[in-house]
């Protein structure tokens, strides 16, 4: 997708004059987005909106041009390098790289914590996710989104779809096969760049969250073995899953994300009604996991669950209170 002259000019202006401190700020904002997208709840796109970089992010993403690869064969000449640098500046590539680095750092870090939590405290962990999701749905809810029959229908469709898919995940009918992983990546990418539900919530809804957390951690560990010259079977198998997920994410970036963005621009209230209702329907999955991980209904078993729900919900509601003056247009 070629960049128009005005976008190219604006991207260049955005990058010029940026100091190291400015780029550190972008990296930290990427960290915040990555943390949001690593736990089911409010999306990284919402964090981008809160931190004031949403418009620049969307402009940069929607002007990524795969055609820049055509310059690669000409990199043996100075003119080729000049053209490449110019094209990358037009796409605001440095901004995306630094922001993406922050997001990647957060995803890898949170995945470590999440895997430990799943193994040691499955009930409270899913209860924490339940609180995050429920509070996110409450924070994003707006009566005008269901003020018409059409919007109410969109909300009902979102809830039913999420409730049904969550049921499939609970029953183990969405196995972690490569096609499912590819689909998960294609849909989850939307949460990373659009306000609404997080990519982690999509993975949770599809029953792939804990699987991808474990796979990513294993892949990162196997990279250390690769650095020492050892290629393990783990690296190949888990690397295949990670590459498949990233392939789905790239596909979704140029298809699903554009479709959702189009829907938001033309049917904003109905689209948000659908997205928020997805969150409500998705609560079926963590609720079922909490029940499955709780052996008995005693004070000692129920209290950690209630505390985890309160902590997760309170964190989102606190964020919502702190940013209540932001207009999510």
Image (spheres, helix red, strand yellow):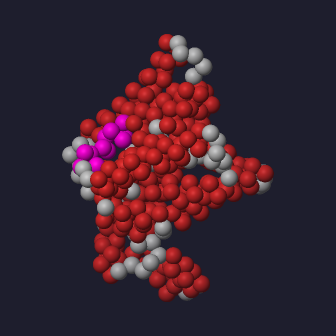
Residue placed furthest toward the top: 299
- Answer whether residue 29 is visible to the viewer in this image: no
Relative side of 268 to 211, left or right: left
Q: Nearer the viewer, residue 191 or 59?
A: 191
Q: Residue at x 78, y 51 (%)?
A: 233
Q: Nearer the viewer, residue 67 or 98?
A: 67
Q: Quadrant of residue 113?
A: top right
Q: Nearer the viewer, residue 201 or 267?
A: 267
Rendered position, 172 above or below 68: above
Secondary structure mostly seen in the magenta stretch? helix
Q: Quadrant of the C terminus?
A: bottom left
Relative side of 68 to 196, left or right: right
Q: Quadrant of residue 267?
A: bottom left
- Answer whether residue 138 is visible to the viewer in this image: yes
Residue 283 image offset from top left, x and y in percent: 46, 38
Q: Residue at x 51, y 57 (%)?
A: 187
Membership of 136 in magenta stretch:
yes
Q: Which residues are magenta?
A: 135-146
Membership of 111 in magenta stretch:
no
Q: Quadrant of the N terminus?
A: bottom left
Residue 210 image offset from top left, x and y in percent: 60, 41
Q: Residue at x 30, y 78 (%)?
A: 6
């Amino acid at each position: 997708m070629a960049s128009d002259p005005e976008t190219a000019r604006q991207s260049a202006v955005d990058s010029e004059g940026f100091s190291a401190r400015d780029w550190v700020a972008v990296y930290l904002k990427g960290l915040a987005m990555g943390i949001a997208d690593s736990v089911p709840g409010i999306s990284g796109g919402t964090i981008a909106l809160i931190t004031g970089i949403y418009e620049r992010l969307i402009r940069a993403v929607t002007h990524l041009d795969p055609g820049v690869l055509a310059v690669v064969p000409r990199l043996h000449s100075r003119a080729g390098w000049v053209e490449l640098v110019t094209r990358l500046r037009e796409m605001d590539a440095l901004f995306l790289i630094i922001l993406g680095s922050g997001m990647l750092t957060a995803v890898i870090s949170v995945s470590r914590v999440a895997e430990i939590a799943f193994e040691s405290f499955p009930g409270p962990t899913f209860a924490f996710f339940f609180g995050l999701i429920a509070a996110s749905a409450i924070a994003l809810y707006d009566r005008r989104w269901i003020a018409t029959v059409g919007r109410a229908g969109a909300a009902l469709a979102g809830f039913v779809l999420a409730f049904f898919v969550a049921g499939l995940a609970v029953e183990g009918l969405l196995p972690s096969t490569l096609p499912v992983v590819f689909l998960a990546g294609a849909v989850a990418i939307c949460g990373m760049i659009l306000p609404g539900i997080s990519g982690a919530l999509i993975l949770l809804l599809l029953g792939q969250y804990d699987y991808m957390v474990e796979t990513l951690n294993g892949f990162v560990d196997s990279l250390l073995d690769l650095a020492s010259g050892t290629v393990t079977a783990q690296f190949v198998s888990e690397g295949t899953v990670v590459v498949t997920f990233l392939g789905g994410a790239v596909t979704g970036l140029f298809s699903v994300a554009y479709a959702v963005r189009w829907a938001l621009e033309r049917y904003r209230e109905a689209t948000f009604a659908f997205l928020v209702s997805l969150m409500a329907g998705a609560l079926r999955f963590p609720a079922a996991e909490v029940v499955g991980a709780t052996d008995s209904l005693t004070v000692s078993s129920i209290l950690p669950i209630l505390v985890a729900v309160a902590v997760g919900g309170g964190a989102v509601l606190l964020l919502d209170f702190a940013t209540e003056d932001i207009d999510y247009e």
